[in-house]
Image: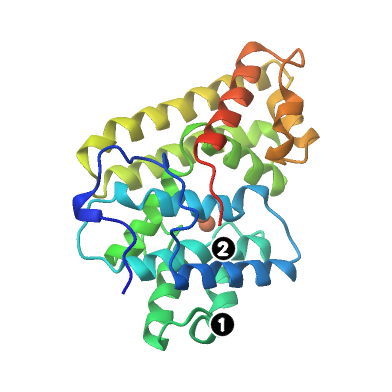
């Protein structure tokens, strides 16, 4: 088994997606991303916030989890494939759809055993089951926690707004819902195990996301959801984010776009 991350001997210099993972992916994960790409080609839906950079950030953050003894290889495969269901279903809990789509290919294309394939699917099915998880194995908990973590910070705010817009929620409904979901995900994280040194960073990223969402809500109270309108204007395509810089938007909106751009550059991931 290839373990990429020194979970028990982690370097404190590496924390929360500060490194690039490109070039360090093992064979099973590379095959998983190839499967993701293939399934994406025939998928009827799109989501700019659930592309491979999301999974790469989760992979980068595995060292945040300080639990010893989980099967890192299975966790990595599950991370790479957990959100493919988003591209096939608008259902809020797309974990079952993801598992259904990948199960026929896991053994032959990723190279795991049938038992491992079942475990991976079980982890993926439960990745949004926050209250009554059907899988509470260490790997399943790790997937849930890492996924929740990517809802924090400026990138998390962008992801919330993209998801709710794609589901057709009006901003008046989306913003309070995002703030509530942020709180729920925070609870999932603090109920789980972490390296103590990371807790302050996690809390800061939670507060950062909450602050931006609250400011965006104030924007909405003024009947001008300019942050959301602007992001829709670039079709949620973050490669076009610089088009929104310094275009006369309120200071907090301009600041959000610049911070988002900077965070994406810092966590840039390539396969
Ligand atoms: Fe998901
Ligand atoms: Fe996810």
Q: Is mark 2 within 8 Å of ligand 1?
A: yes
- Can you give x and y, in whole percent of width and height, for residue 113 in the image? 40, 86
Residue 162: quarter of image: top right
- Out of 43 and 110, give the one closest to the viewer: 110
Residue 94 is labelled as 2
Q: Is residue 206 visible?
A: yes
- Can you give x and y, in whole percent of width and height, for residue 265 in the image? 56, 35
Left or right, 125 with reference to 229: left
Q: Quadrant of the C terminus?
A: bottom right
Q: Extreme right residue here?
A: 233
Q: Which residue is mark 1?
A: 105
Left or right, 147 with reference to 270: left
Q: CA distance from mark 2 to mark 1?
A: 18 Å
> Is the residue under label 1 in contact with that under label 2 (CB below 8 Å)?
no
Q: Residue at x 24, y 48 (%)?
A: 10
Q: Residue at x 37, y 85 (%)?
A: 115
Disc 2 or disc 1, which is closer to the eye? 1
């Amino acid at each position: 088994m290839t373990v990429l991350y020194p979970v028990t001997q982690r370097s404190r210099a590496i924390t929360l997606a500060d490194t690039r993972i490109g070039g360090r992916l093992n064979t099973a994960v590379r095959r998983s991303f190839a499967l993701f790409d293939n399934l994406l080609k025939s998928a009827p839906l799109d989501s700019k916030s659930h592309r491979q950079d999301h999974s790469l950030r989760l992979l980068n953050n595995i060292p945040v989890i300080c639990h010893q003894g989980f099967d890192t290889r299975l966790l990595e495969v599950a991370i790479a494939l957990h959100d493919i269901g988003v591209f096939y279903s608008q259902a809020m809990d797309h974990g079952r759809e993801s598992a259904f789509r990948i199960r026929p290919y896991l053994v032959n294309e990723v190279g795991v055993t049938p038992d491992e394939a079942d475990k991976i699917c079980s982890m993926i099915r439960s990745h949004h089951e926050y209250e009554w998880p059907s899988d509470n194995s260490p790997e399943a908990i790790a997937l849930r926690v890492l996924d929740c973590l990517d809802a924090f910070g400026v990138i998390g705010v962008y992801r919330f707004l993209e998801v709710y817009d794609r589901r057709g929620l009006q901003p008046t409904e989306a913003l309070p819902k995002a703030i509530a979901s942020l709180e729920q995900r925070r609870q999932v994280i603090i109920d789980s195990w972490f390296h103590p040194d990371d807790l302050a960073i996690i809390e800061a990223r939670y507060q950062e996301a909450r602050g931006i969402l609250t400011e965006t809500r104030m924007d909405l109270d003024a009947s001008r959801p300019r942050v959301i309108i602007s992001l829709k204007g670039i079709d949620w395509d973050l490669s076009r984010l610089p088009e929104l810089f310094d275009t006369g938007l309120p200071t907090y909106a301009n600041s959000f776009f610049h911070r988002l751009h900077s965070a994406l550059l810092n966590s840039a991931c390539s396969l």
